[in-house]
Amino acid sequence: MNMSESIHAARLGDIERTADGLAVLQFRFAADQPVFAGHFPGHPILPGIFQLEMARVAAETIFNGAMRVREITKAKFRRPILPAETIRLELKLSENRETTQARAVFTVDGQPAGETILQLMRAT
């Protein structure tokens, strides 16, 4: 199973839409998933690259089309995400002529877990 497939499999429920334009998705990665195998032995945490990829995959789901990362403007990891924790992803998308900015905020049990800003382009 590749990273994108793991993310799709970990998604819980449907996309929620908030009044202020956010898309909210939830994810939970089971402790036995390969993502935790080597990061870190004895103390598994979700790799930061998965948070970045979760934002990209969420944007693809919303736009119903492939997106690629043009630039990572911000990537801040505030707390480790452990196996079986429920991750809340709040995604704000802003389109301009060339790119779509995806601002993603990750929380676990109301605690900030990470934040990223990606510049995305439609894949051709």
Image (cartoon, rainbow, N blue to C red):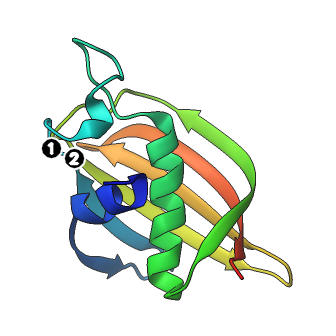
Q: Is residue 102 visible?
A: yes
Disc 2 marks which residue?
A: 29
Give me the residue at 15% from left, 44% from top.
30
Distance, label 1 to label 2, CA atoms, is 4 Å
Give the quadrant of the N terminus. bottom left
Give me the residue at 41% from left, 37% from top.
113
Give the quadrant of the C terminus. bottom right
Percent x, y for residue 14? Answer: 24, 79
Q: Is residue 20 visible?
A: no
The numbered disc on residue 30 is 1
Instruction: Check disc 2 and report its element: helix, strand or loop.
Output: loop
Q: Is residue 79 above or below residue 7?
A: above
Q: Is residue 120 above or below residue 34?
A: below
Q: Label 2 sits on what residue type?
A: Phe
Q: Label 1 sits on what residue type?
A: Ala
Decide if residue 100 is on the left or right side of residue 52. Answer: right
The numbered disc on residue 16 is none
Work out whether residue 124 or residue 107 is closer to the camera in this orientation and state it.
124
Residue situated furthest front in the rendering: 1
Q: Is residue 50 above or below residue 121?
A: above
Q: Indicate the quadrant where residue 66 lies.
A: bottom right
Work out whether residue 85 or residue 53 is closer to the camera in this orientation and state it.
53
Callout 1: 10 Å neighbours few (<14), some, many (20+)? some
Instruction: Check disc 1 and report its element: helix, strand or loop.
Output: loop
Residue situated furthest top in the rendering: 42
Percent x, y for residue 122? Answer: 69, 79
Do tag 1 and tag 2 residues touch (Cβ < 8 Å)?
A: yes
Callout 2: 10 Å neighbours few (<14), some, many (20+)? many
Residue situated furthest right in the rendering: 97
